[in-house]
Amino acid sequence: MAEGFKPIAEYLKEASGFTSSLFQSKHKYSVLLWPQAGDWIEDTAFQFETFSSEYSDELPGEISPTTESQIYETLVIELTKQASSAPANMICLGRAANNDIVIANNTVSKLHTYFVVPEEGGSCEIVDANSTNGTVVNNKRLVAYKNEALFNRDNIHFGPSIQMVYLTPEGFYDLLQHLYRSGITH
């Protein structure tokens, strides 16, 4: 498991007993979901949409044991300031150890991208830092150093190998509640 990243199961336990406002007061940051199962890499957002049923209020369908196993292998990365000396509202992601989010993969640049967190809260923006292998959001390659707004459930590729899903705090809580109602509880 990557250092500093938590498995989604840790959040599932907590969210099952919290109201939305209580959960979001404790987890007020947007997150990246990083599936670790190899067969999820092709279309991460689709996989989450498949078992989330658009987070409807209807009772969710049964989740297969294979999908359940893949869910448990998903890591959660909170978009918070950690180590770098960049401005407080910038969260840097890259291969170098001085980034806030370190992805030890040779297809990720030393400083690959950064997230701009608005001071007043709300959704983040993403900026490709002129990375060698590029950053792609929803199949659209970002222009280097141009801010791009992120929306709940956006699919992000950092180079050709790393794929994640962006969730707002509200979207993350909704997903956890849906998984809990689907029978995913540990």
Image (cartoon, grey):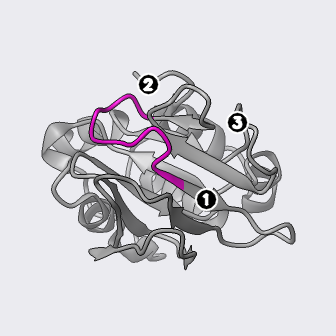
- Give residue 115's mark: 1
Task: Verify CB contact (< 8 Å) between mark 2 and mark 3.
Answer: no
The reply to whether dot 2 and dot 1 touch (C-beta < 8 Å) is no
Nearest to N terminus: mark 2 or mark 3: 2
> Can residue 138 be seen here?
no
Side of 166 where 14 appears, left or right:
right
In this view, the residue in front, 76 or 17, is 76
Q: Which residues are magenta?
A: 103-113
Instruction: Identify residue for label 3.
Output: 84
78 relative to 7, above or below: below
The residue located at (61%, 59%) in the rendering is: 115
Residue 173: quarter of image: bottom right
What's the magenta bit mostly, secondary-structure-wise?
loop
Residue 4 in the image: state x and y as whole percent: 57, 25
Q: Residue type at mark 2?
A: Ala
Circle on res. 20 = none
Within-10-Å neighbours for mark 1: few <14, some 14–19, many 20+: many
Nearer to the camera, 50 or 177:
50
- Image spot of residue 162 (x, y percent): 30, 46
Front position among marks 2 and 1? 1
Asked whether 124 falls inside the magenta stretch, the response is: no
For disc 2, the marked residue is: 2
In what element is the residue under mark 1? strand
What residue do we see at 57% from left, 75% from top? 147
